[in-house]
Image (tube, grey):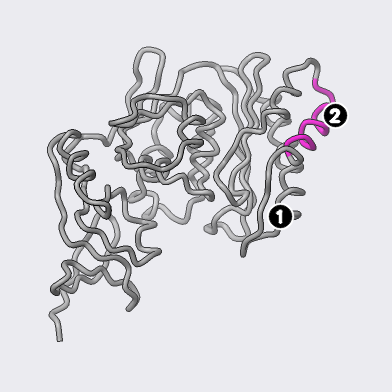
Amino acid sequence: MMNTQAVRFRSLRFELKTGRLGSIFIQGGLLVFTLCDLVQPDNLAEAYQILSDKRNNTILGGCAFLKMGSKRIGTAIDLTNLQLDYIKEQEGFIEIGAMTSLRELETHKLFREYFNGVLPKSVQNIIGVQFRNGVTVGASVYSKYGFSDLITALLALDTEIELYKSGRMPLVDFLKQPKEKDIFVRLWIKKNNRQAAYLSLRKSASDYAVLNVAVSRLGDQWTVVVGARPSVAAIAISASAALAQGTLGVQEIEDAAERASEELAFGTNMRGTADYRKALCRVLVKRGIVEVLQCKSL
């Protein structure tokens, strides 16, 4: 029998068995993932070079979702030495490093002051505190998870993403691009008086959302975002434009919610059917609009 040794890998605990193929991570008796090598580069250029060397070389985030599969990784690249774990207030922007945890996002004073606390609200119900301490912003956004609560909230704000190879671009453009090898470096969120609301429906407190919605307003400009459809979050362009047309009464709000449910595509999975999600969309978008109308500016 192989010798089994308990080790701590980020905030998650696995059993490590060392054999010919490298490090095999086990949880609950099931094969989780295999690492043939692990490196901690000192700069982004080195990290990108290693990432590009082989097809199965991979950037590690918090590894929270990596354990859901049985992926074989050639060289795992840990960005811990690159000092990307930070939240900074810059001139006109808030900057978030790729290795910042969801828990840091949830508790940081800056995000409780801006945008009606929409970012902390979007992540506060994701499983548990220990889990949020391990999950990173970079991995959550770069992976374009359909169930992501964070992406939905970020899309409702004026958010840009910075990648090592592709540079800086609006988050909405990044989400539309095909996946290619790159390194998520940081997020830039424009500081303004945008008022925002985040809503979701879950079957249990720590489950993934059946559907999530973010609504924001800056002056007469509105943004309606729907995620966990179950595909990745998207902006309801027609609904957003309709809200900018003038005075919003009960009928106008109802119409905008209906537009959002009609213009976006919904799918079926174990958490809900397409029709159920479409009905939820109308309800959550309506509630989001009303909540934003009741928000107070900074």
Q: Residue at x 59, y 49 (%)?
A: 228
Element carrying mark 1: helix
Q: Residue at x 13, y 80 (%)?
A: 3
Q: Residue at x 16, y 55 (%)?
A: 38
* Viewer-closest of 180 and 160: 180
* Residue placed under numbered mark 1 in the picture: 274
Element carrying mark 2: helix
Which quadrant of the rendered structure holds the C terminus? top right
* Vertical order, 101 against 117 (above or below): below
Amino acid type assigned to the residue bearing label 1 in the image: Ala
Question: Mark 2 or mark 1, which is nearer the start of the sequence?
Answer: 2
* Residue placed under numbered mark 2 in the picture: 250
* Viewer-closest of 267 and 223: 267
In the rendered view, does 62 fall on the left or right side of 75?
Answer: right
Disc 1 + disc 2, Cβ < 8 Å: no
* Vertical order, 217 against 148 (above or below): above
In the rendered view, does 170 fall on the left or right side of 131?
Answer: right
In the rendered view, does 95 fall on the left or right side of 228?
Answer: left
Crowdedness of circle 2 by 10 Å Cα count: few (<14), some, many (20+)?
A: few
In which quarter of the view is residue 34 placed?
bottom left
In which quarter of the view is residue 196 placed?
top right
Amino acid type assigned to the residue bearing label 2 in the image: Val
Which quadrant of the rendered structure holds the N terminus? bottom left
* Stretch of the chain drawn in magenta: 248-260
Label 1 – label 2 distance at C-alpha: 26 Å
Crowdedness of circle 1 by 10 Å Cα count: few (<14), some, many (20+)?
A: some
